[in-house]
Image (tube, rainbow, N blue to C red):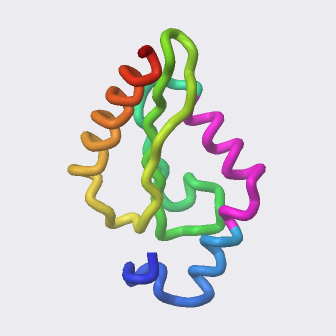
Amino acid sequence: ILDVPEFSEVEHLKKVFKAFKEKAKIADLLSKSLDKSDIKVYIGGELSLEINNAALILSPYSSGNNLTGGIGVFGPMRMDYYNLIPFLITTSKFMNRIMKS
């Protein structure tokens, strides 16, 4: 995170860590995202975490018909969505197969 220019400012980095400490907001965001079977992308203000130049990509996985969890990537708004989204989709499909075993 520290190598990314958007997060190199101390004050902005404090906001990022503060957002992750506020578990209720993160849990609410995750539960809203994981009740769907599709990948979800939150950009800037959509995160509702007082972080304007960040993004979060989430992809759910399940065991059978039960949603088990999700994997995601948090980073700057300018992250490589073109490559990250297919990577997360593939990884969640892999997790689905593992969870069914």
Quadrant for the C terminus, please: top left
58 relative to 32 in the view: left or right: left
The image position of residue 44, as x and y in percent, is 50, 61
Quadrant for the N terminus, please: bottom left
The residue at the point 49 percent across, 11 percent down is 64
**Which residue is farthest bottom?**
10
35 relative to 57 in the view: left or right: right
Q: Is residue 20 magenta?
A: yes
Q: Can you say whether 95 is above or below 4 in the image? A: above
The residue at the point 65 percent across, 61 percent down is 49
The image position of residue 86, as x and y in percent, is 25, 40
Per the picture, the main secondary structure of the magenta-coloured stretch is helix
Q: Can you say whether 93 is above or below 33 in the image? A: above
Q: Residue 10: which quarter of the image?
A: bottom right
Q: Residue 20: which quarter of the image?
A: bottom right
* Nearer to me, 32 or 64: 64
The residue at the point 56 percent across, 59 percent down is 45
Q: Is residue 70 magenta?
A: no
* Nearer to me, 64 or 30: 64
15 relative to 58 in the view: left or right: right
The image position of residue 65, as x and y in percent, is 52, 10
* Nearer to me, 98 or 2: 98
Residue bounds of the magenta highlight = 19-34
The residue at the point 50 percent across, 17 percent down is 63
The image position of residue 47, as x and y in percent, is 58, 54
